[in-house]
Amino acid sequence: MRWFGGAAFVLALSALMSPADAAPQVVVGVEMDYSLALVRELQTEQELRELAWTRRGPPMRSVEVYGAPLAWDIGDGQGHLRIARIEFAAARNLDDAVREMATLVTSSAGQVFKRTVTSVSVSGLEARHISFEKDHSGWRLGGELLVVSDMRSNTMWQIQVLFARRWSASLDQDRERANTALASVRVVEVPNGQDRGQHGAGHRSQASVGCTLGESEDKVRQLIYALDDLPPSDKGKADQIHRRFMEAFNRYLEASSDQELERHAYCRTLDALLAELNR
């Protein structure tokens, strides 16, 4: 079966653009492409300070939290984006912090059927990507989170995108859009005032080298061949992945301010679809 038309395939190979409304903004030393303005969340900051007394590890020296609603229509569901910067009085172990955060977001009642932690790098800093999904009280809850650590300044950033829909709904589209937003994250400044702009520029170049135009074309071909190899009994799966690819592709037809970086995000979407096909 052939799921891609010839014209769509040619356009997909040259798709280098991201959503036009994903404008870069900087909060707490993190630059991120997001269309809604993030605002200070003083109540969340206070809750984090109170929670700090219940955990092990060095005390927090400072905490800042900014948030915004989801930048896409989620129907009768709900969701939120938050970026937090926490400066500790001493070095904080990244994996301990990640375990604590993963437990916090999945510990409420309900069945957790997905929770993964992946080692990544953000602007040359060590980081972890957390992904989870669970059911709770008739809702399907999901989240994509980044925890970034700068050992030199004892600082951690937590960037989380959480979303929920009625239990029968799929979170695939929300997860894809959340990962596209997280792929745009760059650390540009640490609390001691050190400007990481030059390092960030180097990171962008490295990202584009990590996914060249030729490599993105190859990933699209791999996706097409993998879809062709699916048996007729998997038509539903093929239709779903084809739909998600075309949604990502159509977003790349809109204007972009950073084509190289968005190509990297595009490749990450293709990688995720290929991984799902191979499961």
Image (cartoon, rainbow, N blue to C red):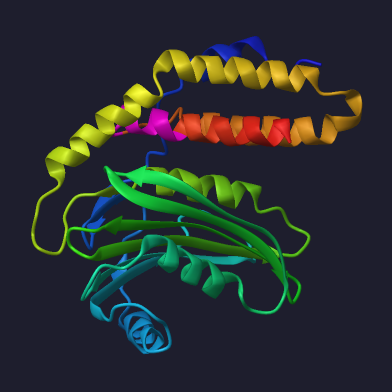
Q: Is residue 254 above or below residue 8?
A: below
- Report whether residue 3 is seen: no
Q: Quadrant of the N terminus?
A: top right
* Image spot of residue 181 (x, y percent): 42, 48
Q: Is residue 213 left or right of residue 133?
A: left
Q: Residue at x 73, y 57 (%)?
A: 169
The image quarter containing residue 58 is bottom left
Q: Residue at x 75, y 64 (%)?
A: 167
Decide which of 147, 176 is in the foreground and name it.
147
Q: Is residue 184 above or below residue 171?
A: above
* Image spot of residue 105 (x, y percent): 55, 71
Q: Is residue 207 above or below residue 38?
A: above
Q: Is residue 147 left or right of residue 226?
A: left
The segment highlighted magenta reads 257-265
Q: Quadrant of the C terminus?
A: top right
Q: Residue at x 35, y 77 (%)?
A: 57
- Report whether residue 12 is seen: yes
Q: Is residue 218 left or right of residue 119?
A: right
Asked if the stretch drawn in magenta spans residue 19, the answer is no
* Image spot of residue 265 (x, y percent): 43, 35
Decide which of 173, 61 is in the foreground and name it.
61
